[in-house]
Image (cartoon, helix red, strand yellow):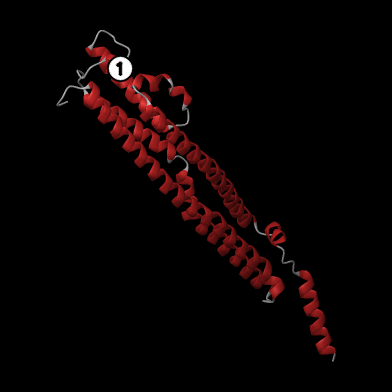
Amino acid sequence: MNFFLTEAFAADQVSIGIDTSSWEAILKASLVVQFTLLILFVLSVACWSIILVKRRQIKRLRHSNIVFTNEFWKANSLDLIYERIAEFPFSNMARLFKSGYLELQRLAETHTSGEKRLSVIGPNLTGIDNLERTLRKVVDWETSLMERHLTLLATTGSTGPFIGLFGTVWGIMGAFQKIGQTGAAHLAVVAPGISEALIATAIGLAAAIPAVVAYNYFLSQVKKEVLALNNFASDFLNIAKRNFFKPGE
């Protein structure tokens, strides 16, 4: 009878000594695991900040491009659109148009007597390659702006689980070291190390999964916007060829 009472008392002592809360496990974790969790937390906060900012940016960009293209195709001349270009500060198509218009104006000034309005310039310009080069440079620059900070999402998505795995391995190593120091393998000895190890794995996945999903989503959205930007550049170039450049240029 005394034997069973002693075992029951020991079991009660073990259960009392174990705190299963996640926060307590993090506070009692080793410095290496805590530093690993801090890295994952910082990466997660940075990724969510990028997600919120990039979502707003793309939504605003798409709306501004729709408004600008509607006005562009309704206008009777490029000069009228250029005079209103300040109304579309968030449209990359407007910035593309502005660069193309200024290049057309520069070409016109070199072939005429400094005429400032393209609406009175006939199809007598040369140097279409310069215009194509200008439009291509703007498209490349706008593409890099849309892709900015997406690298961090990709990096977090690919490295987050491995960073968490490092914390997991370290926590399990700590659990085995405690077994070796105490010579006992009961739950009270191994539970803290196993708990911090599993928390590191969970936080690593929690940081990586949203980052991967957001990266794939935003990458597809950027591709759509780049395609639309290239199409507008082609339309602008065709308009310029028909109206301002010599046949055959």
Most extreme residue toward the top is 113
- Where is residue 51? Give x, y as percent: 53, 46
**The quarter of the displayed image where residue 190 is located:** bottom right
- Where is residue 35? Give x, y as percent: 61, 52
- Where is residue 135? Give x, y as percent: 31, 30
**The quarter of the displayed image where residue 15 is located:** bottom right
Q: Residue at x 61, y 65 (%)?
A: 198
Q: Residue at x 47, y 25 (%)?
A: 87
**The quarter of the displayed image where residue 120 is located:** top left
Judged left or right of residue 212, residue 134 is left
Q: Which residue is mark 1?
A: 119
- Choose between 241 and 24: the one closer to the eye: 241
Task: Determine whether 102 is above or below 230 in the image.
Answer: above
**Amino acid type for the residue under numbered disc 1:** Ser
- Where is residue 70? Give x, y as percent: 41, 32
- Choose between 185 and 119: the one closer to the eye: 119
Task: Determine whether 128 is above or below 59 in the image.
Answer: above
Q: Residue at x 41, y 19 (%)?
A: 83
Dot 1: within a 10 Å radius of its alpha carbon, few (fewer than 14), some, or many (20 or more) residues? Answer: some
The number of callouts visible is: 1
Q: Residue at x 28, y 9 (%)?
A: 114
Judged left or right of residue 182, residue 47 is left
Task: Determine whether 216 is above or below 25 in the image.
Answer: above
